[in-house]
Image (tube, coloured by chain):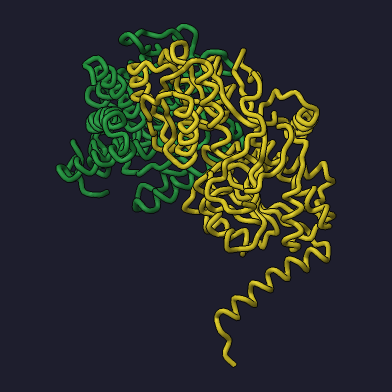
């Protein structure tokens, strides 16, 4: 008897699917894979997402849909080149039921290429790459964080309303930065603003002096930037040190100040940012979450922790409906699509492309604290360019 | 680009180059004298920065933190040399690379365990937290000026010690023929210990001075290490004067590259290195030494 390769592959696919169903039926542990950075520039983000997930799991008694949760974490090092190997380690090696992560958009893109072929339920917990819920969108891929468009587009309107008509853009030159800038420019030129200059800084370079001298010479009305983590801390300090803080107002998506506000100190004073969350949001869910996160970790929660928290809460709701059966396919996806969360960030639901529909807040640093000035865009829904799902 | 902007960018480039020199000088010193390729050099830079942050949180003054931190770094260097590096003088470079790379992992893990993964800002001392106006639009923080002055002072001091003192003479002798120096009754091992310790302290000092400018974060050592190697290779491995020239070249090329050729900003430094190596395969001032 000859066995064709196709038949063999088919059998293999069936067996993994079957084993997933079998494990679900027998109430085996629910294996959740975490593909997150635990070292390098984004290490703190990875840890906060992980702990946010664990806080939520603890609130559900360590069980989702009746199955005990088992975490399998892999350090993705924010390195897209290592992403395929890391994703395979989780899917083929560890045979996780659900894959979550990553932080870095480049890693997310590499991950998407693989999970689109493997039928593993995937929840993107941070990376805002447009393609995840755009050109590469897939029925079994959801995102609980944001899209780059969502956190940058509303800022254009904010700046125009403040009378800033000439802006310099400066950003880390990888997909996150590029997409933030594209979304910002879309809104800015629509409203009649002019971009004087775009400065692309190679990631993760943090030597900004030369470009700051350029900005000082150009004298724009305002500067819109994308930097995050340690790079954002350094940029904001350098910006203030160069004497620009008082002269040219600084704007960005919320990642400019998120998690690094204490490191930035007085240099961050006055910076306005747009984001789908703020530590100071005044709602009951946020207060409860921040309290339990602090109790569990000793650290303050942030936007990354919220994404982790909502990821597990989303799963809890959906898995509850299908009684923990991760092999349930369509029913599970339908259950996820129907998610309604009273999230720390405010009301949360999924768009047809599986990206959150959420309010985007305008925040400002005042007295070393992030203050919520108001809602910059209500029910912001990513345009999901290139996604045919649900259309 | 207007003349004033060129001048401003030149200042930026020189200032960046001076800091690179401070890190790279320790690396080239250790290689030139001990013949050890020290991958852990970046970790010492990171350690210095973390010490500056941790000590200045406790003492309330960064200058005081540096005064305490510098001997601490020298001591760490001495311990690392005695416990690890000293066993490798007779081995080949591969063994050294493996060991020092292991040290990088060790120090990274140590940093994570001791201080966590948060990004920390370091406040400049009040006496040095004013800014100097540069042109009409920009200002120059005093700490950057102070850092640049420190780097120049260290460069001059290193030159004086190596060329003008008895100890410097032993260092130079040890670098060119350690066996002969030993035969003449000089304890080369001790010279090596001191040099490694000094190299560590230099990396630590660079980290401490840079801490308020770069903020303190995990993995900060690695990026500096790569640039330091570029500087050292351009300057000629083992040459301190070469490292100075190399650092200036890299600092200025990087600064102007960013403004004039933003698309190639990250490649420019390496293009400069390639060009220098094509012209002078041993670097600008590399001695014609055979591998030890």
Chain letter, yellow: A
> Across the whole image, how many numbered discs are drawn on residues?
0
Toward the bottom, the furthest residue is A1
Relative horizontal placement of residue A307, taking residue B160 as reference (left or right): right
Can I make out residue A322 in this image?
yes
Q: Position of residue A362 (x, y in %)?
A: 61, 23
Q: In which quarter of the view is residue A125 placed?
A: top right
Using the image as rendered, state which of residue A31 and residue A109 is in the foreground.
A109
Identify the residue at the far left of this view.
B279
Q: Residue at x 56, y 56 (%)?
A: A86
**Percent position (x, y) of residue B184?**
25, 38
What quarter of the picture does the N terminus of chain A occupy? Answer: bottom right
Answer with left or right where residue B95 lies relative to residue B240: right
Nearest to the observer: residue B151 or residue A359: A359
Query: Chain coloured green: which letter?
Result: B
Q: Position of residue B163 (x, y in %)?
A: 22, 25
Task: Place residue B33 in its image quadrant.
Answer: top left
Q: Position of residue A345 (x, y in %)?
A: 71, 32
Which residue is at a point 82% across and 41% down the rendered structure image?
A59
Among the 4 quarters of the image, the one containing residue B28: top left
Q: Residue at left 36%, top 47%?
A: B89
Residue at (70, 40) in percent of width and height: A51
Q: Is residue B73 visible?
A: no
Out of B239 and A299, give the one closest to the viewer.
Answer: A299
B189 or A156: nearer the eye?
Answer: A156
User: Is B86 situated above or below B139?
Assistant: below
């Amino acid at each position: 008897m000859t066995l064709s390769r196709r038949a063999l592959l088919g059998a293999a696919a069936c067996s993994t699917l079957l084993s997933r169903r079998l494990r679900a039926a027998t109430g085996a542990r629910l294996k959740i894979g975490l593909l997150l950075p635990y070292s390098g520039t984004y290490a703190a983000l990875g840890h906060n997402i992980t702990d946010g997930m664990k806080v939520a799991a603890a609130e559900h008694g360590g069980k989702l849909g009746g199955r005990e949760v088992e975490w399998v974490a892999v350090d993705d090092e924010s390195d897209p080149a290592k992403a395929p190997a890391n994703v395979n380690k989780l899917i083929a090696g560890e045979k996780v039921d659900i894959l979550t992560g990553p932080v870095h958009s480049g890693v997310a893109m590499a991950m998407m290429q693989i999970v689109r072929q493997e039928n593993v339920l995937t929840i993107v917990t941070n990376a805002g790459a447009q393609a995840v819920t755009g050109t590469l969108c897939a029925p079994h891929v959801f995102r609980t964080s944001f899209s780059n468009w969502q956190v940058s587009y509303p800022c254009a309107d904010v700046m125009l309303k403040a009378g800033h008509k000439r802006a310099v853009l400066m950003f880390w030159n990888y997909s996150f930065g590029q997409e933030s800038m594209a979304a910002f420019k879309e809104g800015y030129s629509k409203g009649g603003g002019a971009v004087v200059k775009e400065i692309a800084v190679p990631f993760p370079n943090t030597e900004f002096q030369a470009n700051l001298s350029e900005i000082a010479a150009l004298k724009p009305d305002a500067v819109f930037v994308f930097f995050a983590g340690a790079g954002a801390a350094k940029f904001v300090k350098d910006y203030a040190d160069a004497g620009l803080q008082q002269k040219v107002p600084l704007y960005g998506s919320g990642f400019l100040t998120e998690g690094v506000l204490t490191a930035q100190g007085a240099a961050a004073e006055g910076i306005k940012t747009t984001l789908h969350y703020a530590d100071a949001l005044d709602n009951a869910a946020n207060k409860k979450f921040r309290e339990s996160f602090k109790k569990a970790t000793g650290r303050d929660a942030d936007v990354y922790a919220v994404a982790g928290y909502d990821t597990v809460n989303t799963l809890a709701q959906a898995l509850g409906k299908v009684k923990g059966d991760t092999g349930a396919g369509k029913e599970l996806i339908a259950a996820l699509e129907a998610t309604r969360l009273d999230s720390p960030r405010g009301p949360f639901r999924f768009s047809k492309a599986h990206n959150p529909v959420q309010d985007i807040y305008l925040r400002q640093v005042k007295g070393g604290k992030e203050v919520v000035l108001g809602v910059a865009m209500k029910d912001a829904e990513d345009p999901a360019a290139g996604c045919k799902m649900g259309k | 680009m207007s003349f004033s902007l060129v001048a401003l960018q030149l200042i930026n480039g020189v200032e960046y180059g001076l800091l690179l020199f401070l890190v790279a000088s320790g690396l080239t010193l250790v290689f030139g004298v001990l013949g050890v390729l020290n991958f852990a050099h970046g970790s010492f830079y990171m350690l210095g920065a973390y010490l500056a942050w941790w000590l200045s949180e406790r003492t309330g003054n960064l200058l005081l933190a540096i005064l305490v931190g510098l001997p601490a770094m020298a001591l760490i260097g001495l311990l690392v040399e005695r416990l690890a590096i000293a066993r490798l003088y007779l081995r080949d470079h591969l063994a050294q690379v493996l060991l020092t790379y292991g040290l990088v992992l060790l120090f990274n893990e140590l940093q994570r365990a001791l201080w966590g993964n948060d990004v920390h800002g370091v406040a400049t001392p009040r006496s040095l937290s004013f800014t100097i106006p540069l042109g009409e639009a920009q200002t120059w923080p005093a700490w950057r000026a102070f850092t640049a002055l420190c780097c120049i002072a260290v460069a001059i001091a290193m030159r004086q010690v190596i060329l003008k003192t008895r100890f410097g003479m032993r260092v130079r002798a040890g670098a060119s023929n350690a066996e002969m120096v030993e035969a003449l009754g000089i304890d080369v091992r001790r010279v090596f210990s001191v040099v490694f310790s000094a190299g560590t302290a230099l990396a630590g000092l660079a980290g401490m001075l840079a801490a308020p400018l770069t903020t303190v974060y995990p993995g900060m050592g690695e990026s500096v290490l790569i640039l330091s190697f570029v500087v050292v290779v351009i300057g000629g491995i083992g040459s301190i004067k070469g490292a100075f020239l190399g650092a200036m070249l890299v600092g200025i090329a990087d600064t102007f590259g960013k403004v004039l050729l933003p698309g190639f900003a990250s490649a420019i430094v390496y293009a400069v290195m390639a060009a220098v190596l094509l012209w002078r395969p041993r670097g600008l001032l590399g001695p014609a030494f055979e591998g030890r």
